[in-house]
Amino acid sequence: MNIALITSNNLRHINFAKIICEHINVKHIVFEHKAYGSESLQDKELSYFPDCVEWEPDVKHTFQYHGNVSKLLVESLLKELELDYIFTFGCGLLKPSIYNIPKYGCINIHTGLVQYYRGVDSNIWAIMDEHMDRIGSTIHYIDSSIDAGKVIDQRKLDLTTLSSSDTLDDLFIKTCILGIDLLVDNLESILENKINTIDCKTSGKLYQNKDRNEEIVFKAEQKLKELLS
């Protein structure tokens, strides 16, 4: 199987690339430059993924500015690889010219349960809804929708792994780790083309960056403290 990865350059994304490369042969990695959302998240990722700071992939890889992944140069590069799958995590939205390249499709890690929350900040919206039971991760096929492609697998976060000192950043990183673990656990069935998709019945509300502001983040942080106390 010929596999490529499309991800970003934050430590959580490098951890994704590192772990997948440890489990399967990867033909190419495309890293998309993405700035950290906050200094606190950057510091927190450093505490979770210190071994990723100096990691260099042994496979061919390219770096692209944000928004350039769907450009003709990247499209041409990926087509030459005769890919069976592309695995994505944390990159920008892909155009059909990219996600239609691999023979069997593109598979994405979404840090949320798509029947409840799509787009960004799934954990924040679950907390604001006081639904900690709706925190988890999903792996799904990419199509023209946003996080509404056919679901391969999903898993709720084990809330017993949380501590009273956990912040929104901890929660986000733990769902990132959960999503990567979920993909790893499904690699065998994916590579053997023995995938049974899940019918989630409903598609969750789509949240975008414009829906989040400092007041909502503050309230969610306070609610999380209350829920974990």
Image (cartoon, rainbow, N blue to C red):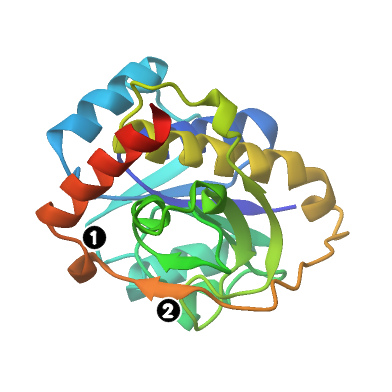
- Image quadrant holding the C terminus, namely top left
Residue 35 shows up from this direction: no
Q: Residue at x 68, y 32 (%)?
A: 23
Point out residue 130 in the picture as x, y percentages from the top left corner: 42, 53
Q: Indicate whether 44 appears above or below 88.
A: above
Q: Residue at x 44, y 75 (%)?
A: 205
CA separation in Å, label 2 and label 1: 14 Å
Point out residue 227 in the picture as x, y percentages from the top left corner: 40, 37
Q: Residue at x 51, y 30 (%)?
A: 18
Point out residue 208 in the picture as x, y percentages from the top left corner: 29, 70
Q: Tell me the element at label 2.
A: loop
Count of labels shown? 2
Q: Nearer the viewer, residue 120 or 51?
A: 120
Q: Residue at x 44, y 21 (%)?
A: 163
Pointer 2 residue:
95
Residue 78 shows up from this direction: yes
Horizontal side of residue 81 vs 117, given as left or right: right
Q: Indicate whether 56 appears above or below 38.
A: above
Horizontal side of residue 162 vs 201, given as left or right: left
Residue 64, image quadrant = bottom left
Mark closer to the chain start, 2 or 1: 1
Point out residue 218 in the picture as x, y percentages from the top left corner: 16, 46
Pointer 1 residue:
66
Mark 1 belongs to which amino acid?
His
Q: Nearer the viewer, residue 150 or 190?
A: 150
Q: Tell me the element at label 1.
A: loop
Mark 2 belongs to which amino acid?
Lys
Q: Nearer the viewer, residue 49 or 138?
A: 138
